[in-house]
Every structure is written in structure tokens, then in C-alpha cells.
Amino acid sequence: MHALNPHQTQAVTLPLSNALILAGAGSGKTRVLVHRIAYLISHYGLSPYAILAVTFTNKAAAEMRSRIESIIQQPSQGLWIGTFHGIAHRLLRIHWQEAGLSQTFQVIDSDDQLRLIKRIMKDLNLDDKQTSPKNIQSFINNQKDQGIRASHFNSNFNYNFNQAKNYAYPSEFIQVYVSYENLCNQSSLVDFAELLLRAYELWTKNQNLLTHYQSRFKALLVDEFQDTNQIQYLWLKALSHNTNPPLPILVVGDDDQSIYGWRGAQVGNLAAFQKDFAPVELIRLEENYRSTSVILNAANHLINNNTQRLGKNLFTQSTQDNLNKNNLINLYTAFNELEEAYFIANQIQQAHASGHLLKDMAILYRSNAQSRVLEEALLLAHVPYRVYGGMRFFERAEIKTALAYCRLVYAREDDSAFERIINTPTRSIGEKTQSDIREYAKNNNISLWAAAINLLQAKAFPARAASALQNFINLINQLQQQTQDPNHLIPLYEQIDLIIKHSGLITFYQKEELSKAESRLENLGELITAARTFIPDNSNPDNANPDTPLTPMAAFLSHAVLESNDTQADQAQDAVQLMTIHSSKGLEFPWVFISGLEENLFPSPGSINDLNKLEEERRLMYVGITRAMKKLTLTHSESRRIYGETTRHYPSRFLREIPKELILSIRHTNNSAPYHSSSSSHSSAHSSTYAKTYPKAPSLFSDNSNKNSEFEIGQSVRHETFGLGVILNAQGTGDRLQLQIHFDQGGSKWLTALRLTPVK
DNA sequence: AAGTCGGGACTTTTT
DNA sequence: GTCCCGACTT
């Protein structure tokens, strides 16, 4: 990287006043933020302790911190940098009393939240077919995101009088919201939206506390401002308004990259900021350092179709990209999704063969469901790949169950944890016993744990149930004695190891289907490793508040929920990157493929008849295009099988919004393609039948006897954990293909073929 | 109480 | 196609 350009310099060296930096894709936004913070420290002499910087992901926060440290050449101790949720969580841990929380409050993820809502709906006798729990969940989160509590609805449960709006919500929505709030308070549980709302209320209800932070912070910075929601905006406003001296706030954003409206982000916050925080210095960063002019032109033309924009046009000084054939955007029309995937895999193979690194290539798609076919094609082509997104480590069932044991050991009032593990592994505590406990807890306003103990004392259960329940209670108490003995402190990973071993989960999971059992046990082992390498975030003096020392276990449990991102361990491996366009935001790749450019897929079905949603889809396309540095390849298919059904697909309107002269339509160049590919101008009337009339892709797992099959008895294979081995036997087909492997390191195991790589 | 089968739902994702 | 849940069987 070279020197800052004039606009970047202007942004970095602004006076201590409010500012909005409209930063286009690839315009060096992070660089500006990082330099600005360094400048605040070196030029304005601010202590890192006086700076608060908010990002959208933990990853961005970590990256920014390390870049700041490398500029200022010292540890950034005291600097508060993190996500809104992370910062809110920190505040609530420090000020749990003022926030009306218990000291041992736990953060729950959306999966836990949904379970609680389903539980409540059952208790209230609400039919989950009539009112979907997911709708209620998003209703509750939407309310919280706007600062509206259940108590803000009037006694008829019908009107939101607090906001003086005349919206009528179904009364059961509000009923569930009320019960949900009660249950969370009772169980000391805080969901993601609650973190933000509580932190906001912490400001508005405790003037002293607010004043303390207002005098502590001398500068606020917010990244990805277009993705902030109402409560985040209000939180910032409460913190920075009416302060003396003024607390300058600098926000960075790009309205064209606002792609999270569907989860409450308000692009309008950019415009609102200019009004509410006036005077605001506005700086545009429009010089793009990432992409070729062809790619930028395409992006600019596309986004010009949006009506709701603040206005901005990216340009580049890059000269190495005149309109010659090599630089044009490639467009490929496939017959079906298998052939589309085959084409992409083939292109990647060829590029790889001619010396390009696989990790410089990314395949982007609108929805995760599209990844499977692509993965199969890459496997077939022996191209290593890495899929981002999907199920994350701390979200896996076995991990959540193990952590629920930790939670209950740590805090008995945690009903969510109690429910999850009372009969997992199955220990003969059936529905009857459980519903008795629930009923009693509800009637007496106590936790499930307390209810269970009371009922046992009252001898309310038949002998069998009573003894099973007593054993469970004893188990948890015993686990606490073993792990939390103040006279005999043991390291966190040993605590978790012990809890897992005594929980009975290992035997329980061993009974599952072999490949599943295998991976679950591996994950449980991985959990212990994660605990072993876990370093609590106590870089900030505030976090080591002597009044509220967070035990390693408490810190680990919060970490598991708030920073559940997979650690990108195998980043060093040269592999193609597969991800949704959403998760590609902020990243860049020399060569980008965007697949599935079809109406009703991208743009997605729900967005086509809604201008706001359609424009968000277009921004998503804009984000996708601007990920590409040198080469962009777009593909679409004329027919596609979705959820087992093949339908005809038409090219995405976004393809038409890119100027023709920037696009080169290409066809298959490889004759060994397993599809008829001689023409892409075939009569499309037949295309819906291609899946049937043309030979099926030689799928890796569909047929053991297939000569193309990847695996044969006697062949060498590699497993990530167990290393090299030889195939002894096989059973099952498709995804359920299981292979018995004799490993070089000794022993043989039955494993799912999906986790094995052939070795030549 | 626990395990098995069939019907319906199914964007995007971080925290 | 796949996951989840509820109804059904053992």
C-alpha cells in the first residue's frame, strides 16, 4: 500500500468534530479508520482509553486492533474496540446491578431463543401452525431493536401506544413477548437484542453512569454504519449527545453496500446522522484500489438502477485493463445446475493448472443451498475448496448440549440449559415428569431446578421418576463440587473435560450412526481444545473490575455465544473459497465467480415485487461484483433443481443491467465435459428435461460400482484427524457411504466417505 | 419412556 | 434433498 490519497488524508486528519465518510467498495475504508485512530492518539494525544470504536463483526474488530497496534507500535491497551453486542455485553458485565441483571446472567443465541419461544407457546396453548414461532421470534427482536418492551403495549395487548402508532399486533404475539421477558428475567438469560436494549437503557436510566462514560470517551468511531439498526443508533446518540466538551463521532459507511435491511439495519441512519449530529463533515472516498475498470464500470452501471442512493461513483486509475477480451466479464449459460457447477470447476482447474492459486478464487452464490452441487463438482475435479458459513462450531448440537451442562453447573436458574439436558442423554425423565416440573415452576415463579427439588422433597413423583430425577440433581451438584471447589481450582479445560466425561454424553453419542458419532465425539474433543487455548479478554482494565471478576467458565460461555465464529485454522491451505455474497462482504479475490444469476434465485422470489427489497438485492449484486479484483465470471442456468424439483429459470435482470460491451459470452472449451455442451443456443423448450435425458453427473458417492468412483477397496485415503489409511470395506451409498479404513497409525474405523480424501 | 416413520417447511447472517 | 416435529409403535 502506498501513501493515503488526498480524500483519505482529509478523513484521517479531520478536526475533532462529527464526520461521515461515505466509502465505496475497495476505497480503503478500513485503512482510513485505522489511521484515524492512530492519528487521534499520536496527533491529538488521546489516550487509547478515551477511544471507542465499533465494528460489525469480531473479525473486523480483531483485524483493526492489530493494524492499529502495528501503526502505533505499542499494545492498544485500554482501547475499546468491538462489536455493538460485544461492547454492550462488557458494559452489562461491569454494571450488572444498574442493569437489573443477576451477576451470573448468560447470553443465549437465536436457537436457544427460539426454543424458549416454542416452550412458551406450548404453555400458552398456542398453535404453532397458526402462528409460527419464528414469526414471533422476529416480532420480539424487532420490538427490542426499536426499544419497545412488552410493557409498552397497553393492557388490551393491542396497541403500541408508546410509539403512538396504531399498529395492531395479534394479541398472542404480545402475550408471548410478555411471558418471554418474564422467563428470561427469571432464568437470567439475555438474548442478542436484549444486550443492545439493556445497554441503551443503561444510558437512559443512569445519568451518572452515562456522564462517566461521556467524560471518559473523547472520540467515537463506527464502521459499517449503513448496517446499524434503530437501537444501536439511539445508543450512540444517547452517548454522544449533549456532552461537554462535545464527543466527536466519526462514522464510515456505504449506502450501496447495505444488505442487511431484512434484519433491521436502517440505511436511513446515514441520512439521519447528517441531521441529528449536525454539523457533519462529509467526505466521499470514491477511488477504488481493488478492481479493474471493466469490473467497476459494470458495478457502477448496475447500481445506477437503484433510485434510493446518496450518490457516489467509483473510479480507478488502474490502466492495465483496456477493453480487450481477457479483461471482459465472462458470462456462461448452463443447461442445468450440475453443468453450471461443472463449468466453474473446470475453469478453476484450468486456471490452477496455468499457475493461479486456488485461494485467489471465490465462488459466490445467493443462498447456501447452492453450495452442494458446486462442492460435488469440485470434489469430482479434485479441486480443494473451503465452504464458509453453515453450521458453526459452537452451534452444533453436541457442543450446545455440553455447554448447557456447564451453564447449569454454573447457574442453576438457567431454565434453558435445564430443559436441554434434563433428559439428554436419556435418563428416564419423561414428558410427564418434565411437565409437572414446568407447571410447578410456573405456578410458584421459581426456576425449573428449584421446582424439581421442591417436588422431590414433597415426594410428588412415582419412585422410578423420582430416583431418575434425583440422580440428575445429584449429578449436577456433584459436577459443581468437582469443578468449582474454591480450595482446589482446576483449569477450565479440565472442568469441561470432567463435565463431558460425567455427563454421559460420550456413551450417548456413541450409540448414534457411526459417522455422526464419530464427528460428534471429535467435536467434543475439540471443545476441550478450544477451552485449553481460550484466553479471556482482559486486555481492558475495566474488564478486570474487582467487583465482578468473571470466572474462566463464565468468560468462556459468553465467548462461545458472542464469538462463535470458526477460527480459520486452515487458512494456509490453498483452496477455493465458497460463500454466500452476504458473507463475502469486506473480502476481495483476484478471480470471482458469481453463480445462479437467475430470476427467482437472484433476485430472490420475495424481492421481485417489492422495490425496497429488489434494490437491496441489487446492492447485494453490487457487493458481489466489487469483490472481484481482476476477473469476474457470471453464470446462470436455464433449469435448476431446487428442493428436489426441476424448474425452468430465466436470466437475472441484473445481467441485463451490465453494459453488453463489458461482457463476453463464453462456452465450454473442454470436450471431456460429461454433458452435451456443443451449443448454448439450443432450443430451450427442452431444457427442463435435460436432467433426465442427459447422463447424470458421475457423482462421487452415488454408485460404488461406477468406474469413476473415487473409492475402491485397497485404495489409500487420508482423514483429517487420523491421517493415512487403506480402504478395507464399504457399505451404504450416496452421502451415507461408509468406508472401513485401516489407518497407518494403527486400528481400523468405519467412517463416512465425506470426510475422506483419496490419495494417489 | 424411547425409538421410528411420515409430512411440511425451506432466503440472506452476525451477534 | 434435508431437517425438524409430531404421531405412532414397541
Image: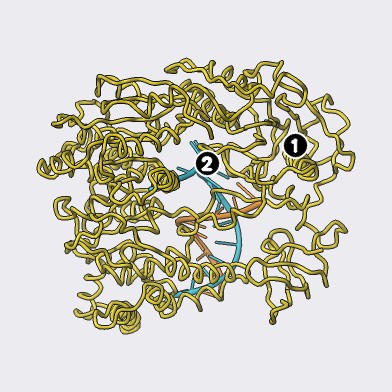
Chain colours: A yellow, B cyan, C orange
Q: Please identify the residue farthest to the left as the structure is shown.
A: A208
Residue A596, percent from left and from top: 66, 34
Image marks 1 and 2: residues in contact by CB distance under 8 Å = no
Instruction: Say above or below: A97 vs A159.
Output: below
> Could you say whether the residue bearing mark 1 is in a helix, strand or loop?
loop
The reply, left or right, for residue A44 in relation to residue A528 is: left
Q: Which residue is depicted at the point 27% across and 52% down?
A: A90
**In the rendered structure, the residue with mark 2 lies on which chain?**
A
Q: Quadrant of the N terminus of chain A?
A: top right
> Could you say whether the residue bearing mark 2 is in a helix, strand or loop?
helix
Indicate which disc residue A336 carries.
Answer: 1
The kind of residue on which mark 1 rests is Asn
- Whether labels 1 and 2 share one chain: yes
Q: Which residue is depicted at the point 82% across and 69% down?
A: A715
**Which one is closest to the eye, mark 1 or mark 2?**
2
Total labels drawn = 2
Indicate which disc residue A583 carries.
Answer: 2
